[in-house]
Image: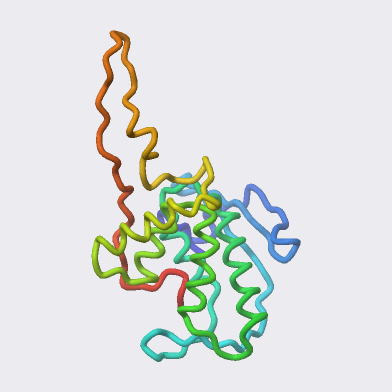
Amino acid sequence: MQCPFCKADKEKLKVIDSRACDGDKSIRRRRECLSCGKRFTTYERVEENVRITVIKKDGRRVPWDRAKILAGLERACFKRPVADSELNRIADETEEAVFAKFDREVPSSSIGDLVIDKLRRLDQVAYVRFASVHKRFKTLEELLEEARTVIDARRFDDPGQGKLFIDEAAAATPPVVANGSPKARGKAKVAAPAAAQDKEPGEH
């Protein structure tokens, strides 16, 4: 293992906290690099002999890899207020759902559908980032339509989630300043999603 920031060898890494998680199925360790001073989290879990194969969109078949789901979630949630424990929870729940439904092969699109459904409940901005790659939007209009769908789904709305649009009712009512005159508001803006990558986030 190396430091993800300065690539220092494992001899320079110090474990500062260790605890069980995921229902005692894994161990979370908080590590500090003695070389650069940065901290990061690692997880240890028993590796199971999984025989499930993932069918890519281009027809290729690759072995199941939970780490790819986690990597896709990390890209979608980059600089978003989402805890590592939430990303691991989604990865674990997706893995459990796949193993329960599929015996030997699973389409990568099905994995993405499972991830995106859980991500929509977690953070709206991260959801649109993920969806822009998973659903392969070809135009800005398709992206905006997906964003509006998230806004309209009020049952997923949460005050802690990243907002894609300014509330229309609030935007239509100009605030009153000290002298009593209304202050004009700007138009609602769309939160810019991360640039789409060639990789399929959360898909193998």
Q: Residue furthest top?
A: 179
| Image quarter of residue 7 | bottom left
Q: Nearer the viewer, residue 175 or 133?
A: 175
Residue 175 location (% of width, % of height): 34, 22
Q: Is residue 200 visible?
A: yes
Residue 31 location (% of width, % of height): 57, 52
* Left or right side of 187 for 87: right
| Image quarter of residue 186 | top left
Q: Residue furthest right?
A: 24
Q: Nearer the viewer, residue 94 or 139?
A: 139
| Image quarter of residue 76 | bottom left
* Left or right side of 29 for 201: left
Q: Nearer the viewer, residue 112 or 71?
A: 112
Q: Is residue 7 visible?
A: no
Give the residue displayed 46% in from the left and 78% down from the top: 109
Question: Compared with residue 175, is residue 51 higher up or lower down, i.e. above or below?
Answer: below
Question: Compared with residue 181, is residue 184 higher up or lower down, i.e. above or below?
Answer: below
Give the residue displayed 40% in from the left and 65% down from the top: 131
